[in-house]
Amino acid sequence: MATGKSIYKRLIQAACIIILIAGCFCYGYVRFGHNTLPQVALPNPHQLQVGDWIFRSGHHADSLLIKRLSHSDFSHVGIVVQTQPTVQIAHATTDDNADLPDQVLLTPLHEFLSPKMADAVAVARPRFLSPAQRAQTAQYARQQIGKKFVLTARGEQPFYCTLLITEAVARQNVRFEPRWQYVDVAVFRGDYLFPQGLIESDVDWVFRATIQSQ
């Protein structure tokens, strides 16, 4: 049973996270809320290969919170599963599509990086995978379309954006140990794999773009 001191600690943490979310929301509104949202530059399809990882920075409160907690410029990641005739991204998300919440989606590049979703983008190509292995990771990710998004700590059967990619990579029998980060904030307590963990791995950077603050 929780002691009075531990309950008090959790209440303080909950209050802090509410304040942090409110601050993130105010920041997003000040930066974008009063104007038409600008479009971040899109990578040329010819720059992309199947199996590339595509990171985005969101400006909603939850995205800002993820960036704050993980000390990162990016809050979400997907994998390129098709480049022709259109670029398609597989990614595990909560609310990119209101009609298909909390699951793995297949999303066109221009929607994945739409103004309401992104203010920065970076594309990485994992160097520790061959082109054939990258193609196989993309194929696996595409087969997960519709799989349920589960935001829980390590050891509690989580499944979210980064884990879609790590599961795909694991099937290639390569050593890949991205850095998990411990979080103890309000209802979130345990180890989580943020996009920053993939950013720190052995990759080539193919493309970067960001919207400059106005």
Image (cartoon, helix red, strand yellow):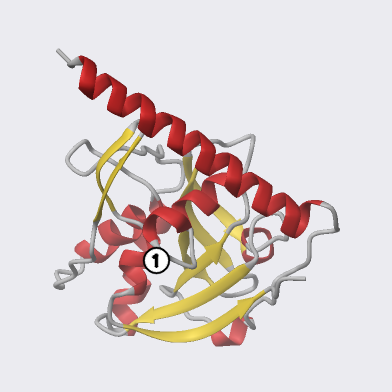
The C terminus: image quadrant: bottom right
In the displayed structure, does residue 80 sit left or right of residue 193? Answer: right
Residue 209 visible:
yes
Foreground residue, 24 or 161? 24
Q: In this figure, which residue is indicated by the disc labeled 1?
A: 138
The residue nearer to you, when weighing 67 against 110, is 67
Residue 209 at x, y percent in the picture:
61, 79
Q: Position of residue 172 (x, y in %)?
A: 20, 69
Left or right: residue 135 compared with residue 50: left
Q: Residue at 45%, 30% (x, y): give it.
A: 15
Q: Position of residue 62 (x, y in %)?
A: 53, 45
Q: Quadrant of residue 98?
A: top right
Q: Residue furthest top?
A: 1
Looking at the rendered structure, the secondary structure element under dot 1 is helix
Residue type, numbered disc 1: Ala
- Residue 133, placed above or below residue 167: below
Residue at (26, 56) in percent of width and height: 167
Quadrant of res 190: top left
210, 27: nearer the viewer: 27
